[in-house]
Image: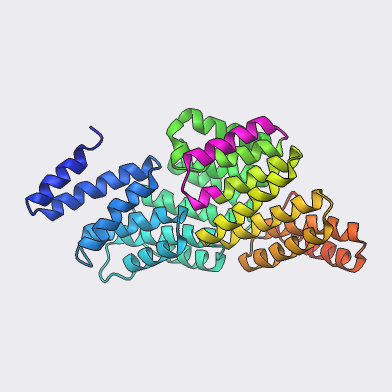
Amino acid sequence: LQDEPLLSALHWRQAGKLDKAWTLELGDAKTQLERGLLQSGLTLLEAIIQEAPKEHALRLGALLLAGSYLVYLDMQRADVYLNEVLNTPALELPLKVRALLALVDNAVYQGDMTKARHFIARAELQDISDSELRLSLEHQRLEVMLRSSEFEKAEAHLPNVYALDKNNIATQSYEAQLRYYQARFAEAAALFEKMRQQDPDCVRRLTLENDLGTTYWTLGELTKAEAELQKSLETWRGSAHVEALSHMHLSFVRMTQGRTREALGLAEEAIDYSRRLGSLTFEADATHHLGVIYFQNGQLAKAREWMECALQQMRGVGDLYRESRILSTLLGVYAMLGDSVAAERTVSEVEAILNVTSNPL
């Protein structure tokens, strides 16, 4: 029965055996989180965090698990939990490595690549013999490469990651993302579809439906794009992380369909979710989307205002791929406004980026 672990935990609580109760509750929380039940899973973890002694192993496990999943809901709280684990005296190596890698993930989505590289470097210094932890480290290396526009480096590193587990779903996801960044969109879509066929439940662990939706939009397949993004919003309802992404990408579908008012509303919702989450990268992306929609609607002054705001935000992140995308659309705005000085400056800025990274604009 689904509730059997929690019923057993209740009996142990009544018998005063809290360690046994917490063990069952921690296991059940993990199961719920893996099924995408974020709120109920995190509620169980919060109870353990509040009840268990400060440095109790089960409390540390609850902090680590909660911090790893709060990347979808509340990055600031995730940082607090993960740093508490990391700062525990005489911390066991596996917990230390997992906390460091979760902090990498959190830093990436916050838009702080300096901090992400710091945590990766600390993780690399650890003597990791566990194959699962080693694979997680390599995944985070790929994440940092992709978010730093180091696409050639990521391509070269992929075979090493596949060598650790040739059928791993997360590795396939990173490859699909790389193909997207390389403008190999049909290959990216095929990989995402293959992943879902291989493991239908992966949509509750990975943002596959969202990623597939934006890939189909790029390929001009609007019906498929809309269907995937709507599924993503249903699968991840209540997750600020995915709500930000899928509202943002759905705004472009609506823009392409000529439904401008809806597109603007969805982009504004995406900005709101990004701020709630605490992700500067997502906020900059959504702000750029809003500017593009205004541009497509001929509202050039508003387009310039929002795109320039997005550019400043993205420069605070340090993601050259996304910065160049903003610059390329701003160039069109400046040209339409007749601002040749700003246009020439923007051309120089794009050329400078293309001199340091392979970037299919």
Task: Report whether 278 appears left or right of 345.
Answer: left
Residue 353 falls inside the magenta stretch: no
Residue at image x 55%, y 55%? 273
Residue at image x 69%, y 68%? 312
Task: Report whether 8 appears left or right of 224.
Answer: left
- Return the x and y of residue 356 as percentages of the image width and height: 72, 61
Q: Which residue is at the front of the view, 21 or 132?
A: 21
- How many numbered discs sit on the rendered protein? 0
Task: Report whether 346 appears left or right of 150.
Answer: right
Picture colour scheme: rainbow
User: In the orientation shown, which residue stands out farthest toward the front?
Assistant: 261
- Return the x and y of residue 132 as percentages of the image width and height: 37, 47
Is residue 358 visible in this depiction of the protein? no
Q: Vertically, is 2 above or below 294?
A: above
Task: Report whether 51 appears left or right of 325.
Answer: left
Q: Which residue is at the front of the view, 309 or 79?
A: 309
User: In the orientation shown, which residue stands out farthest toward the top?
Assistant: 197
* Location of residue 183 by image quarter: top right
Q: Which residue is at the front of the view, 114 or 221?
A: 221
* Location of residue 199 by image quarter: top left
* Location of residue 6 by image quarter: top left
- Return the x and y of residue 150 as percentages of the image width and height: 63, 56
Is residue 289 visible in this depiction of the protein? yes
Q: Vertically, is 132 above or below 48?
A: above
Majority SS type along the magenta span: helix
Residue 229 falls inside the magenta stretch: yes
- Return the x and y of residue 355 as percentages of the image width and height: 76, 61
The boundaries of the magenta stretch are: 220-243
Residue at image x 25%, y 57%? 47
Q: In which quarter of the image is the N terminus?
A: top left
